[in-house]
Image (cartoon, rainbow, N blue to C red):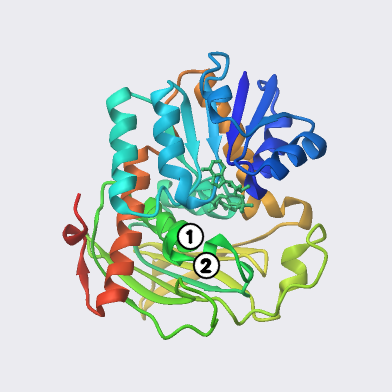
């Protein structure tokens, strides 16, 4: 299969490398609006590259495109690709406004097009294992999830991510992953009903987007999700990004942890401790009991599979398109996560609890 990568910056480069390792992919063609990046795509990755989008969209030999541009271009690239008859994988967040995200879903549904959004944590072993435990009934009904995410300022001055016009919002750009997972664990058929976000003034002076959130959201069955995010605390990373990034940032203020509590058990995922634990609840004459029954870890070479598993996501999408299968997660389901992100921001802006119905369907 010949595959296109549109808006091929950093993430586009990662996808190109994953596609190279995929047996079904016979040719990769990349596109970017920056001519300097087009040259680099040719020299660094050895792929055919162009700044002319039509070269890829008008090529009938390309059935699938990955859209890895900055967020402000997701909508237009997706709509044009669907219009050209391509299957599309578009990076998260879907778009910088909910109306744009809705337009994308509706276009895909109208054309019966394949549209998968890049919530690749649904492929990461740390979190798929939790999902397997949920599906096997080992946790019972998930009722509480608490994510703590504390990191360093890794977007850097001048990045499109920090600007409202291009990045959109920190919630969509970064935290969408961390509300998508609880939606998955609680169950796609259980909608979120309301959300409250409290944000302090920014610590990072040059961000237009927020650098912190304390967000609580409630599901229709009573389950509650909470997210705490701060983006300035973890020590600035000065190590070698190719060498054990998790290990090098361990204990220096970075934290990325999920506690998932169900009615029959609980799980705790800790990225920087490379740890996944499970507890089983029981009964005794004196009290309700909890037994610590699993304690898993993994080695450095497996970090990408446990943490951000874009490799398996890329290969799975190629397989699905080749075999005529639907996306692993429907665009409508991803859109529900985007609705929650926009509602969380509306709450932060207005300082009040926001009903999901307020951000439209
Ligand atoms: N799923 C993940 O874990 C994950 C990780 C990193 C990035 N991302 C997402 O990937 C996307 C890209 O991030 P990045 O780190 O590669 O950014 P980047 O700045 O390195 O690359 C973005 C590229 O898009 C290009 N571009 C902008 N507008 C374009 C347009 N209209 N047409 C074609 N090209 C255009 C830019 O020239 C640039 O090369 C973002 O949406 C980001 O949220 C996701």
Q: Quadrant of residue 261?
A: bottom left
Could you tell me which residue is drawn at 79 percent across and 31 percent down?
46
Q: Considering the numbered disc 2 on the image, is that residue within a helix, a strand or a loop?
A: helix
Q: Report the front residue among 144 and 239.
A: 239
Asked if 264 appears above or below 79 in the picture, the reply is: below
Reading the image, the residue beneath label 1 is 167
Residue 139 visible in rendering: no
Q: Considering the numbered disc 1 on the image, is that residue within a helix, a strand or a loop?
A: helix
Q: Position of residue 37 (x, y in %)?
A: 70, 43
* Ligand 1 under 8 Å from disc 2 Cβ: no
Which quadrant of the figure contains the N terminus? top right
Does label 1 or label 2 sit earlier along the sequence? 2
Q: Report the front residue among 120 and 130.
A: 120
Q: How many marks?
A: 2
The outermost residue toward the top is 60
Q: Residues within 10 Å of mark 2 (few under 14, many from 20)?
A: many
Q: Report the front residue among 128 and 319.
A: 319
Q: Position of residue 153 (x, y in %)?
A: 62, 74
Left/right of residue 282 with respect to residue 316 in the rendered view:
left
Please tell me the numbered disc located at residue 162.
2
Q: Quadrant of residue 143?
A: bottom left
Residue 326 visible in rendering: yes
Could you tell me which residue is drawn at 57 percent across and 14 percent down?
61
Could you tell me which residue is drawn at 46 percent across and 51 percent down?
72
Q: Position of residue 2 (x, y in %)?
A: 63, 20
Please tell me the numbered disc located at residue 46.
none
Q: Are marks 1 and 2 in contact (CB under 8 Å)?
A: yes
Q: Position of residue 16 (x, y in %)?
A: 69, 36
Left/right of residue 298 with respect to residue 129 in the rendered view:
right
Q: Residues within 10 Å of mark 1 (few under 14, many from 20)?
A: many
Asked if 240 appears above or below 134 in the picture, the reply is: below
């Amino acid at each position: 299969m010949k595959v296109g990568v549109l808006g091929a910056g950093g993430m586009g480069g990662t996808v190109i490398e994953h596609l190279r390792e995929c047996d079904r992919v016979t040719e990769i063609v990349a596109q970017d609006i920056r001519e300097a990046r087009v040259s680099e795509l040719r020299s660094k990755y050895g792929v055919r590259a162009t700044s002319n989008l039509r070269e890829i969209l008008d090529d009938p030999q390309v059935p699938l495109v990955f859209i890895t541009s900055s967020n402000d271009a997701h909508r237009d690239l997706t709509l044009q690709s669907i219009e050209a008859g391509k299957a599309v994988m578009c990076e998260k967040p879907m778009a910088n406004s909910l109306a744009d995200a809705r337009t994308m879903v509706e276009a895909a549904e109208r054309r019966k097009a394949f549209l998968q959004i890049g919530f690749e944590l649904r492929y990461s072993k740390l979190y798929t294992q939790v999902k397997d435990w949920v599906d096997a009934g080992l946790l019972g009904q998930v009722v509480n999830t608490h994510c703590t995410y504390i990191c360093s300022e890794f977007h850097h001055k001048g990045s499109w991510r920090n600007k409202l016009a291009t990045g959109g919002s920190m919630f969509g750009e970064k935290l969408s992953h961390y509300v998508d997972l609880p939606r998955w664990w609680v169950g796609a058929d259980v909608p979120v009903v309301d959300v409250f976000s409290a944000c302090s003034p920014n610590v990072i002076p040059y961000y237009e987007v927020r650098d912190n959130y304390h967000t609580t959201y409630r599901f229709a069955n009573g389950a509650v999700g909470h997210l705490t995010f701060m983006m300035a605390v973890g020590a600035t990373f000065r190590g070698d990004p190719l060498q054990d990034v998790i290990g090098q940032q361990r204990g220096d203020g970075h934290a990325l942890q999920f506690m998932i509590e169900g009615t029959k058990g609980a799980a705790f995922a800790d990225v920087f401790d490379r740890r996944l634990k499970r507890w089983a609840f029981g009964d005794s004459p004196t009290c309700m009991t909890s037994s610590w029954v699993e304690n898993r870890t993994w080695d450095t070479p497996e970090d990408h599979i446990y943490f951000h598993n874009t490799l398996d996501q890329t290969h799975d999408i190629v397989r699905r398109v080749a075999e005529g299968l639907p996306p692993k997660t429907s665009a409508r389901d991803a859109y529900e996560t985007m609705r929650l992100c926009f509602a969380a921001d509306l709450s932060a802006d207005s300082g009040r609890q926001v009903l999901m119905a307020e951000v439209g369907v």
